[in-house]
Image: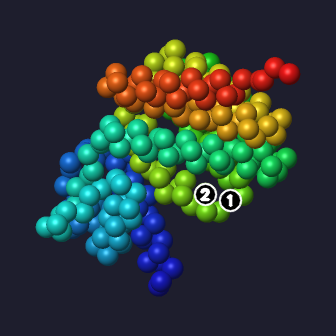
Amino acid sequence: MREQKGWRHKDAVSLLRQMILSGELAPGYALREVAISERLGMSRTPVREAFRTLAAEGLVELLPNRSVVVAELDENESIDVFSVLGTLESLAGQQACQRMTPEQLERLEALQREMEEHYNNHDRASYIRANRAIHELMVEGSNNNALILAWRLILPRAERARSVNTLDRHRWAEALEEHRKIFAALAARDGLRLSSLMQDHFARGVIERMTDTKFKNRVRVRAGSAERAAEPVAD
């Protein structure tokens, strides 16, 4: 019975998270426990527990009057989330250079080819799925359980911000080229270069999610610094 209860909680979390990330449940939408439990076809207990889990992920807000609403998107918070995620993945990339198995590297190469095909076919949805799988595999390749746990905790917030942002074709091409360099650095087991490339990749991604020119300029400086750090140093 305890195992079934655990699975119901996981199902509720997964279903509600997907509904929020897809936009089916919009920011500010009131989540009523009874209505949601009926909609998901389960009792109120796993739904109530799911609300707490999603609140920890920053996807919903638990208000003082015990009501629950889908959290509003905050630009500054999204920028901070991507900055933290970039730092985590930069460290993960460094450690993956040392710890990733040959089998994981082969899988990463296959995902890179898939992503290239989706880009050429203008299949954005499939591209995003392959992109996410690449980032996840790289983090798992770090073989650092504490880092993986922190990454999984913050990922839903980043995915939500990403879901409401559509890259233009030019930035999409840039992002793909950045991924080519990232894979090359990982295949060469060059941890320092990979770390710099990851910082640059995330800094440039943050720029696309900002509307305030002042913040854009500040992050562009950071991105430029990371890019220069990734360049080979002449002997």
| Element type at mark 1 | loop
Whether residue 167 appears in this view of the structure is yes
Q: How far across and down, in percent of the image, does residue 115 sit?
A: 64, 30
Q: Which mark is residue 144?
A: 1
The residue shown at (44%, 64%) is 11
Q: Quadrant of the C terminus?
A: top right
**Number of other residues with Cα within 10 Å of mark 2, as a class: few under 14, some 14 to 19, many 20 or more:** some
CB atoms at circles 1 and 2 under 8 Å apart? yes
Question: Which residue reaches farthest left?
Answer: 65
Question: Which residue reaches farthest front?
Answer: 235
Q: Amino acid at mark 2?
A: Ile
The residue shown at (61%, 63%) is 146
Total residue callouts: 2
The residue shown at (34%, 53%) is 59
Q: How far across and down, in percent of the image, does residue 139 sit?
A: 65, 49
Q: Which residue is mark 2?
A: 148
| Element type at mark 2 | helix
Q: Nearer the viewer, residue 1 or 20?
A: 20
Q: CA distance from mark 1 to mark 2?
A: 6 Å
In this view, 103 is above or below 187: below
**Colouring used for the render:** rainbow
**Number of other residues with Cα within 10 Å of mark 1, as a class: few under 14, some 14 to 19, many 20 or more:** some
Q: How far across and down, in percent of the image, does residue 8 sit?
A: 43, 71
Q: Nearer the viewer, residue 217 or 78?
A: 217
Q: Amino acid at mark 1?
A: Asn
In this view, 113 is above or below 152: above
Q: Nearer the viewer, residue 104 or 235?
A: 235
